[in-house]
């Protein structure tokens, strides 16, 4: 199959747009999800600063957000996005639902990564007089780094999938190309190319993430 | 003795509330540990040893009672004051509990950075500590690249970083082989002597206590069963709990046919390191012209001396028994007659 120069440009633009959405959304989602994940562990029953009410409330909110299918969340959040950015169309606007849709899931992943940290090490830090904040910053996060990295690779690929879904509501990027050409104009070849590009991007993120995680993990050897 | 007290525990009780009611881990514990001594706390698994040592830095908050360390009542401090106080109390663990993603030297710097020492200063101090524990050449190794003994050495260096007055050791050698155990115990002894740090050693192994402790408390089912100088408890265990620890594996020997026969007189002979073991028994048999049946022996050589206990079955003839006793008296060997419930 051969594509015109304009088509090739479209693919390139779509790919860059998708990258932009995914990277920005992942960063912003971690800005919210990481502290929430830490808070879930710290405030838990066996946490270093148990706060039962906060912990339970946070848990319920996160579960509610997580149980909403992303496509529905996407539509439901249009007014919110419009209120924040003035529009609900295009790649920048899509970042809003992507962040809100993925932050709860990131919080849960961060929570499980940090829970893997050996309780004995945390206890040792406490025995040295570490404050809860010092334990979070100097023990939990550094010790969980490899696992957090794996989580980030998973998060990126999930957000990439969400961003493609956003194509149905004019979200921009490869998703929109696939919908516009593949769905509305029956150009199967265009759809296949966008699909291949999406798969390739997922592979790159996944491979790079796993590779980094393995390299930085000092527990083996 | 006019020694200064560094740890005092008064009326300590610790209960854990669980789904199936409360678990009493410790009850009515009174304890006093002197500055500069190596104090052992020994007991079987589940006796409450870990809970007790964790109460000494308040990792575990007592349900009742008070804990004093270096004149400060820990149980009355605020969180912030407590964190400050903990810097003067080092602790090491059975599983080492090192930061797995940090190198040896970073692990040792860790407590220093926590207390606000700058990085350069911390590294300088860490290098000195690496020297003390004999691992200067492994400073950039990650814990996963170190042996168990090396990991414990790093953990010791880390615990000493803030120059504590007390070092708490919870089963610090229980994950190590006998040779490594000895080298760690020697290191602890050296630290105690060189730096004057009071050491509290928690263990379930009598030989650990024998090797380095001056005094010992025997913890049995949440209570202190017995407490005193190691030699004294070792010579004359007053309680069943102490005897269980001194004579492990009693069930096995009770099956021996010669054992537990009624009307048999038995003697416990204690070797406290002053007398070599083999010649004493061999000569006793030769000199007294009376055979004895060795029912139990738990002895080992420590620095060329024999330490341990032996239980022998006495001959029936009265005069042979008095010859044996006279011989042991002459050799200055401690002994006592025991009944069959000692084992
Ligand atoms: N956090 C806890 N929650 C409930 N029970 C506990 C807890 N820690 C210890 N225990 C119980 O307290 C008793 C003493 O435990 P521990 O101090 O660990 O004994 P040791 O160190 O002598 O083996 C045990 O019965 C144990 O199950
Ligand atoms: Mg224990």
Image (tube, coloured by chain):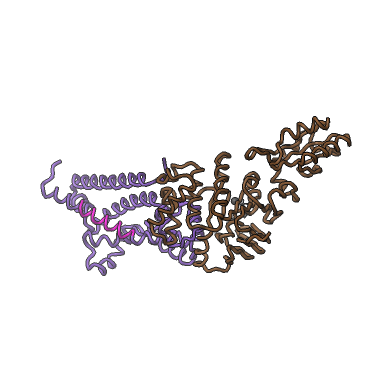
For the image, the number of numbered tags is 0
Asked if residue A87 lies in the magenta stretch, the reply is no
**Quadrant position of residue A62:** bottom left
Quadrant of the picture in which ligand 1 is shown = bottom right
**Quadrant position of residue B118:** bottom left
Residue A155, image x, y percentages: 34, 53
Report the chain shown in brown.
Answer: B
Going by the image, does B103 lie left or right of B40?
left
User: Which residue is farthest left?
Assistant: A5
Colour of the chain lettered A: purple
Residue at (27% x, 55% y) in the render: A23
Residue B154, image x, y percentages: 48, 48
Please state which of residues B262 and A31 is positioned toward the viewer in this rendering.
B262
Residue B8, image x, y percentages: 63, 62
Please state which of residues B140 and A49 is positioned toward the viewer in this rendering.
B140
Going by the image, does B285 lie left or right of B36?
right
Please identify the dominant SS of the magenta region: helix
Residue segment shown in magenta: A15-30
Please state which of residues A200 and A49 is positioned toward the viewer in this rendering.
A49
The N terminus of chain A lies in quadrant? top left
Residue A182, image x, y percentages: 20, 49
The C terminus of chain A lies in quadrant? top left
Asked whether the viewer can see residue A59, the reply is: no
**Quadrant position of residue B277:** top right
User: Which residue is farthest right?
Assistant: B318
Going by the image, does B188 lie left or right of B328?
left
Please state which of residues A24 and B216 is positioned toward the viewer in this rendering.
B216
Asked whether the viewer can see residue A100, the reply is: yes
Asked if residue A18 lies in the magenta stretch, the reply is yes
Residue at (86% x, 34% y) in the render: B320
């Amino acid at each position: 199959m051969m594509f015109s120069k304009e088509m090739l440009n479209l693919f390139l633009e779509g790919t860059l747009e998708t990258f932009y959405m995914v990277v920005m959304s992942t960063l912003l989602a971690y800005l919210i999800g990481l502290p929430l994940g830490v808070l879930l562990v710290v405030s838990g029953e066996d946490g270093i600063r148990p706060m039962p009410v906060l912990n339970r409330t946070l848990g319920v909110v996160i579960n509610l957000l997580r149980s909403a299918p992303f496509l529905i969340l996407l539509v439901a959040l249009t007014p919110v996005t419009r209120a924040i950015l003035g529009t609900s169309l295009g790649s920048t606007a899509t970042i809003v639902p992507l962040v809100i849709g993925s932050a709860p899931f990131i919080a849960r992943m961060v929570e499980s990564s940090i829970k893997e940290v050996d309780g004995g090490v945390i206890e040792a830090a406490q025995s040295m007089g570490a404050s809860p904040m010092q334990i979070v910053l100097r023990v939990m996060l550094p010790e969980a780094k490899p696992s957090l990295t794996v989580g980030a690779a998973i998060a990126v690929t999930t957000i990439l999938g969400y961003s493609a879904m956003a194509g149905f509501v004019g979200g921009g990027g490869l998703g929109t190309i696939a919908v516009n050409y593949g769905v509305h104009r029956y150009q199967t070849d265009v759809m296949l190319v966008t699909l291949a590009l999406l798969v390739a991007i997922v592979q790159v993120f996944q491979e790079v993430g796993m590779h980094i995680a393995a390299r930085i993990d000092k527990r083996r050897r | 003795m006019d020694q200064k007290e560094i740890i005092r525990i008064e009326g300590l009780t610790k209960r854990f509330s669980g789904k199936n009611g409360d678990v009493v881990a410790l009850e009515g514990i009174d304890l006093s540990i002197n500055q500069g001594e190596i104090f052992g706390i020994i007991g079987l698994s589940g006796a409450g040893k870990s809970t007790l040592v964790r109460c000494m830095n308040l990792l575990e908050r007592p349900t009742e009672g008070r804990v004093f360390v270096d004149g400060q009542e820990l149980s009355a401090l605020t969180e912030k004051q407590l964190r400050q106080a903990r810097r003067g109390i080092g602790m090491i663990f059975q599983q080492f509990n090192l930061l797995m993603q940090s190198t040896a030297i970073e692990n040792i710097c860790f407590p220093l950075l926590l207390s606000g020492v700058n990085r350069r200063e911390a590294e300088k101090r860490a290098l000195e500590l690496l020297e003390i524990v004999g691992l200067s050449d492994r400073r950039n190794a990650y814990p996963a690249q170190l042996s168990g003994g090396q990991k414990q050495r790093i953990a010791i260096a880390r615990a000493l970083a803030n120059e504590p007055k007390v070092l708490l050791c919870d089963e610090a050698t229980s994950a190590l082989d006998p040779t490594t155990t000895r080298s760690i115990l020697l290191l602890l002894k050296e630290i105690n002597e060189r730096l004057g740090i009071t050491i509290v050693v928690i263990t379930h192994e009598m030989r650990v206590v024998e090797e380095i402790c001056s005094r010992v408390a025997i913890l049995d089912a949440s209570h202190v069963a017995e407490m005193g100088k190691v030699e004294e408890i070792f010579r004359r265990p007053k309680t069943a709990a102490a005897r269980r620890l001194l004579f492990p594996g009693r069930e096995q020997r009770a099956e021996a046919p010669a054992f537990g026969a009624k009307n048999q007189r038995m003697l416990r002979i204690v070797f406290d390191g002053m007398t070599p073991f083999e010649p004493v028994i061999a000569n006793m048999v030769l000199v007294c012209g009376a055979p004895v049946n060795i029912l139990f022996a738990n002895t080992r050589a420590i620095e060329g001396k024999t330490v341990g206990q032996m239980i022998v079955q006495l001959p029936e003839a009265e005069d042979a028994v008095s010859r044996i006793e006279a011989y042991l008296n002459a050799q200055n060997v401690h002994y006592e007659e025991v009944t069959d419930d000692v084992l």
